[in-house]
Amino acid sequence: MDLNQPRHLDLKKDQGLTIEWGDGRRSFYPIEYLRKMSPAADARHLRDQIAKNPLTVLPTGMRSGPIAAETAELVGNYAIKITFTDGHTSPIYSFAYLRKIDPDRPDGAVV
């Protein structure tokens, strides 16, 4: 088994995604963090805008308040697609990307 492939995925729709990786490491991704770090082009663009100007106005589709996952499905053996209660339906999180954005990375780096 590839050590960077998940052995086990556990999604709690109102809390977050827990992944047990092939190397034994466990990662927890809160739902709000997954939504914020969506790899979809529009979300990446918004993160870039916010990095340049923290006073960036959020799009009207992004509601405030609690967010949850509505559905999740595997995409082949390389990713998971998660849809959110705020209508964001396009993000496909590759396992390589999830490993890269792990909030508890040992080196502390988050992209």
Image (cartoon, rainbow, N blue to C red):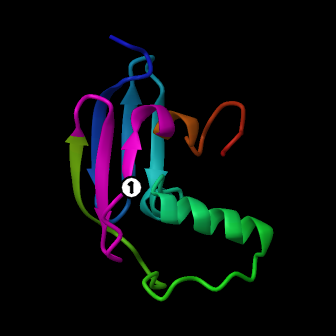
For the residue marked with disc 1, what is the amino acid?
A: Gly
Q: Is residue 5 above or below residue 84?
A: above
The answer to which quarter of the image holds residue 3 is top left
Quadrant for the N terminus, please: top left
| Residue found at the very far right of the displayed protein | 52
Going 32% across and 75% down the picture, which residue do you hit? 87
Going 72% across and 31% down the picture, which residue do you hit? 107
Residue 45 position in % (x across, y down):
60, 64
Q: Looking at the image, can residue 36 be seen?
A: no
Q: Is residue 35 part of the magenta span, yes or no?
A: no
Residue 4 position in % (x across, y down):
44, 21
Q: Is residue 2 above or below residue 28?
A: above
| Residue found at the very far top of the displayed protein | 1
Residue 53 position in % (x across, y down):
78, 75
Going 46% across and 81% down the picture, which residue do you hit? 62
| In this picture, residue 87 sits left or right of residue 99 | left
Boundaries of the magenta span: 75-97
| In this picture, residue 32 sits left or right of residue 67 | right
Residue 18 position in % (x across, y down):
38, 43
Quadrant for the C terminus, please: top right
Which residue is nearer to you in this view: 20 or 3? 3
Secondary structure under tag 1 reads strand
Residue designated by label 1: 16
